[in-house]
Image (cartoon, helix red, strand yellow):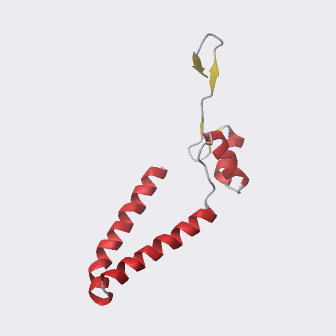
Amino acid sequence: KCVAQATAVFWLSNFLVSLTFLSLARGWGHAQTFFLYAVIVVVSEIYFYFQMPETTGLSLHEIQQLFESQGSTTAAAATNNGGDAAAGVELPSVQESGQGNEKEIV
């Protein structure tokens, strides 16, 4: 789901740059146009740095708890229902069987 959203944002931003670049370059010049795009990137970086939590090195369970603590009702409902709240499906759990590295899906 997130990969699809990221891809859509990527293509939308590429479309906007392609749509505006020639007009801005003719009107302002190439240097000012690139500077404008750079300012947009820097402002976006600052916004997302402070708005999105860092998830590097966290497990999926830890990421879920992180977003629950920030008030995500969908994630909280999924945890309380024992599954995916949006789909109404109970997610299977993985248990170790005690013999070596074998794991059993329950």
Identify the residue at the far top of this view.
99
Q: Residue at x 47, y 76 (%)?
A: 39
Identify the residue at the far front of this view.
31
Residue nearest the observer in this picture, 79 or 8: 8
Judge from the rendering whether residue 44 lies leftward or rightward of residue 67; answer left or right.
Answer: left
Question: Which quadrant holds residue 51?
Answer: bottom right
Residue nearest the observer in this picture, 61 or 86: 61
Judge from the rendering whether residue 35 lies leftward or rightward of residue 15; answer left or right.
Answer: right
Judge from the rendering whether residue 48 lies leftward or rightward of residue 73; answer left or right.
Answer: left
Q: Residue at x 41, y 75 (%)?
A: 37
Residue 20 at x, y percent in the picture:
32, 79
For residue 29, say whether it is visible.
yes
Residue 28 at x, y percent in the picture:
33, 88
Looking at the rendering, in which quadrant would you find the C terminus?
Answer: top right
Q: Residue at x 30, y 78 (%)?
A: 21
Please say if 79 is above or below 45: above
Please say if 83 is above or below 11: above
